[in-house]
Image (tube, rainbow, N blue to C red):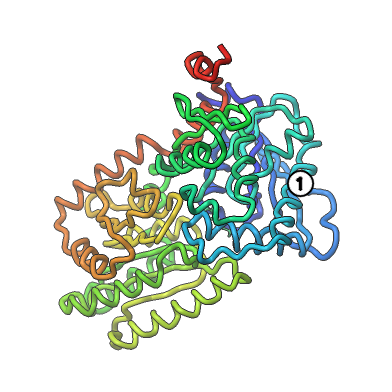
Amino acid sequence: MGGCLVSRLVVVSNRVATPKAAQAGGLASAMLAALSEVGGLWFGWSGKAVAGDPGPPKEETDGRITFLTTDLSKTDFEDYYNGFANRSLWPLLHFRPDLVDYSKQNYQGYQRVNRHFARTLAPHLRDGDTIWVQDFHLIPLAGLLREMGIAGRMGFFLHTPLPPPDIMRVLPGHRALMDALTEYDLVGLHTNAYVRAFVNYQRDLAGGQKLPDGWVRTGSGRLVRVLALPISVDPDAIASQAAKAVNNPSVKRLRAGLTAEDRIRLAVGVDRLDYSKGLPERFEAFGRFLDRSPQHRGLVSLLQIAPTSREDVPAYIELRGQLEQQAGAVNGRYSDPSWTPIRYVNRTYPQSTLFGFYRAACMGLVTPLRDGMNLVAKEFVAAQDPDDPGVLVLSTFAGAADEMDEAVFINPYDIDGMADAMARALDMDLPERRRRWSALMARLKRWDITTWRRAFLAALEEPPSPEVLRSTGVM
Ligand code: F6P
C-alpha cells in the first residue's frame, strides 16, 4: 500500500527527529521516512527538561510533516525518563530483573507524563487519524487517549525485546502495563519469540486466549492483534552513502591511520554505551583473541564507538568506568608505538561517517547480551563493498539474528567462543565472505524499512477476519 489507506498518520515517540535535531537514530529515521511518504504529524518530547511548568507545545512544519514537541518539567523528566523508563522498564525488557530499580514515585511520574502527552496531543487530533505510538516510554498512551474519547485506529511498536511472563511479573504493576498494551488495535514486535512472550502472558497471567492470524482475545473480551514485524533499514541508500563516504575526512583519516605502517585490518563496533550491548564481554573476547592469535597482533584494531547515554542512571556510570579500565588493560598489554588494539571512542558520528567506517572494516562486532533488533547489524551488511565484503559477527541474542543466518554467530557469555569467532571471521576467504554477504544483502532488500512500515500500517487497518470473529463467538 502507499499512503492511500491511511487518512493522516500521527506518530508519537519519546524522541522526535525535528529538522533541527542533531542526529536521527534507527527509530527516528524510520519514522521520518514513513511520515515523508504519507505526510502527517509527529509528536513527542522536545529533548528539554525545564524548571517549572513546560508550557504549550511547539509546532513547526517541514514539507509534509508537522512536528509537535513538548518540554518536560525537570521532575517529570527525572521520574519518567531517568526513573521508570530507564531504571525499571529498560532492564526488565532486556531480561535484567537484577537491575530493575522500581519506585512508586517513578511509576507515577511515568503515568503523569503519559497523561501529559495524551492531553497535549488530543486537541491536535482529527477524526480518522491513524495513531502509531513508538516504544516502551509510551505504553499507556492508547488507553489514555481512548478515555478522552479518541476513537481512531491505534498501533504500537515495541523497539525492545519483550521477555517471557516469568520475567515480566518481576515488575510491580506488570498487569496494568500489559493491559495497557491491549488497548492498541495492533502491537508490533521484532520477533516471533517476543510475540510468544506476549501471547503467553495473556494466556497465563491475564485470562486471554490465542486466536488465528495473530489475534488475541483479552480477559476482558477485547481483540488485539500481535505480529512479528522486524524493523529494517534502507539498504540501497546505505550502500550508496557508504560508497561515497570514502571521501569523508573522518573515514580518510581512519584509512590513512590503518595503512600507515603494515596494513592494519579494522574490526568495528558501534553501540550506545548500554549494559545490554555486551561491551565488557566484547573487550574481554578481543583481548582473549589477541592472547591466542599472535599472528593477528599488530594487524587488527578494534574501533569501538560507544556514545554515552542515560548518564544520570547509576548502572550506566559504572559501565563507563569498567570499559575505560578494560580498554586500558588490553591496550597496555599489547599496544606498540605503531598499533593500538582497541580504539575506544565515546563521541557520536553522523550516520554517513559510520557507514564509511563499516565499509572500511573487515569485521563488524554486534554482540549484545540482549537487543530488540540491532540495526547496526543490518547497516554493517548494507555498507559493505560487494567485491570485498567484511564479516558480521552477531550475537544470537539480538533480534536481528532471526533474519541473518549467514552471520558468524556467537554467544556473548562464551568469551572463548567469541574469541574463536573473531579469528574465524578474520581468516574467512573471499568466496565464503561473498556468499554470506550476498545472501544477507538479498534478504535486506526483500524486507527493507519501507516494507516494514507498509506492512505495519496495512495490518493496522485490517479488521479481524470472519474466521477470527467466529472463534470469538461474535459471528
Ligand atoms: O532500542 C530502543 C530505543 O528506544 C531506541 O529507539 C533508542 O535509540 C534507544 O532505545 C533510546 O535511547 P534514548 O534513551 O537515548 O532515547
Q: Quarter of the image for the C terminus: give it.
A: top right
Q: Is residue 380 visible?
A: yes
Q: Is residue 267 left or right of residue 223?
A: left
Secondary element at tag 1 = helix
Question: Which of the two residues, 224 or 388, is positioned nearer the viewer here?
Answer: 224
Q: Is residue 231 visible?
A: no
Query: In the picture shown, does residue 294 fall above or below 419?
Result: below
Percent across and percent down for residue 4 are: 58, 22
Percent across and percent down for residue 394 are: 32, 56
Question: Which of the two residues, 153 or 258, is positioned nearer the viewer here?
Answer: 153
Q: Is residue 55 left or right of residue 177?
A: right
User: Label 1 CB, ligand 1: below 8 Å?
Assistant: no
Residue at the spot 45% in from the left edge and 39% down from the top edge: 195
Q: Which residue is the site of mark 1?
A: 115
Percent across and percent down for residue 285 are: 30, 72
Q: Is residue 81 left or right of residue 150?
A: left
What residue type is disc 1 on?
Answer: Arg
Quadrant in which residue 472 is drawn: top right
Percent across and percent down for residue 14 are: 65, 51
Q: Is residue 165 left or right of residue 416?
A: right
Residue at the spot 52% in from the left edge and 30% down from the top edge: 216
Quadrant in which residue 323 is drawn: bottom left
Residue at the spot 76% in from the left edge and 35% down from the top edge: 147
